[in-house]
Amino acid sequence: MSIPFNIPPCTGDEIKYIQEVINNRKISGDGDFTKRCSKWMEARFNAQKILLTTSGTTALDMALLLCDLQPGDEVILPSFTFSSTATAAVLAGARLVFVDVRPDTMNIDEKKIEAALTDKTKAIIVVHYAGVACEMDTILDIARRHNLKVIEDAAQGIMSTYKGRPLGTIGDFGCFSFHETKNYSMGEGGALVINDDTYNLRAEILREKGTNRSAFFRGEVDKYTWVDFGDSYLPSELNAAYLWGQLLHAEEILKNRVDSWSFYKNELQFLENAGKVELPYVPTDCEHNGHMFYLKLENLNGRTKFIDYMRKHGIYCVFHYVPLHSAPAGRKYGRFAGEDIYTTKESERLVRLPLYYGLTEQDREKVVYRLKSYFS
């Protein structure tokens, strides 16, 4: 009997809301369910404005395009992230400058950002890895002193906080993902958090194929037309209805995932105490969302052996990102600032355990039993 790494979340209400969309004969974007989801998140996170998008990637695309980057401008980001973080900056015309991570959280090392700045730097993208916040006070201070935009890649960070503030609402823009691997899903989807209302109208135009269609539906113009550059970033109402069925159970899903995370942490702490593994670290000022539980083994070879052992026993554990600066596109579009002390070394040691909404107590006990057997 296999235990998969991930099962997409489903609360049981999704079909009811999808059927409602079909019955209403309104399945394209920006219908009632899209509005419900946006308003729910704006209220839950005390956010100025949130727009649903087709993916976390397109939310990042919008954020970087709204930063008005020019050819030759540079964007600071970690190399330990998914390609979407980088491609959004490349799409906007920027060069990538990769910065090393902190080994404790796998987030960008805030102490190494300033040394990577040049007169061409225009923005910093922070990635809240595993739903644990970056050191935002330090990063915001750097951005303020150097007049830089801050984009939060909070694809893994919805419902997490930093000093009580929801991730995604702290920088200039925040980006969520509702991919099937995330805590809340619409299959493919995302959201852009806009924390400065001066960007609201332009973001709507960018999202609506360059038209002022949103203003038209609010009655602010008598007809809508093409007014600026844009693309189509609206998700289908069918996707939004699926997400709505999960947002209504958001606290339940959060608690379920955090409970599984805490179970792993408590059961495996003795292995860290014995020096056999390293477990996730959550700084005091941060509250996480139970997005991911990972171990760090001694090296790449040890990780490979561990993954093979677990899979032979029907438990699917997986590694994570290959550092972007080592990839062909990373070398083409960017450079690594300073020394790669931790990014590659730590990424090769990291392995993720099964964790998803609805992971049974029996299955997580099996994971822990096998893991203990391996290390014994």
Image (tube, grey):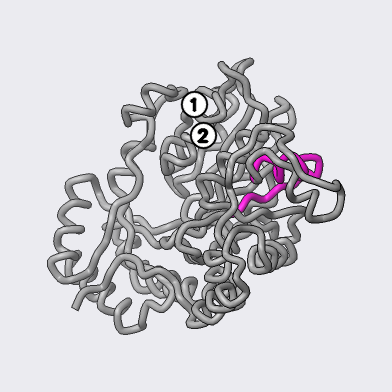
Query: Which amino acid does the dot numbered 2 rest on?
Result: Leu
Location of residue 275 by image quarter: bottom left
Q: Is residue 138 visible?
A: no
Q: Characterize the local packing of mark 2: few (<14), some (14-19) or many (20 or more) Cα atoms within 10 angstroms.
A: many
Which numbered disc, 1 or 2, marks the residue that appears first in the sequence? 2
Camera-near label (1 vs 2) is 1
Query: Which amino acid does the dot numbered 1 rest on?
Result: Leu
Residue at 51% from the left image edge and 22% from the top image edge: 95
Residue at 69% from the left image edge and 64% from the top image edge: 35
The x and y percentages for residue 75 are: 56, 28
The tally of labels here is 2
Q: Is residue 233 visible?
A: yes
Residue at 47% from the left image edge and 49% from the top image edge: 105
The x and y percentages for residue 243 are: 55, 68
Left or right: residue 189 versus residue 364 is right
Assign a secondary structure to mark 1: strand
What is the magenta range? 191-207
Identify the residue under disc 1.
96
Identify the residue under disc 2.
77
Give the main secondary structure of the magenta stretch. Answer: helix
Label placed on residue 61? none
The answer to the question of whether label 1 and label 2 lie on touching residues, with beta carbons closer than 8 A, is yes
Asked if residue 365 is positioned above or below residue 337 in the image, the reply reads below
The x and y percentages for residue 261 are: 43, 69
Assign a secondary structure to mark 2: strand
Residue at 43% from the left image edge and 22% from the top image edge: 335
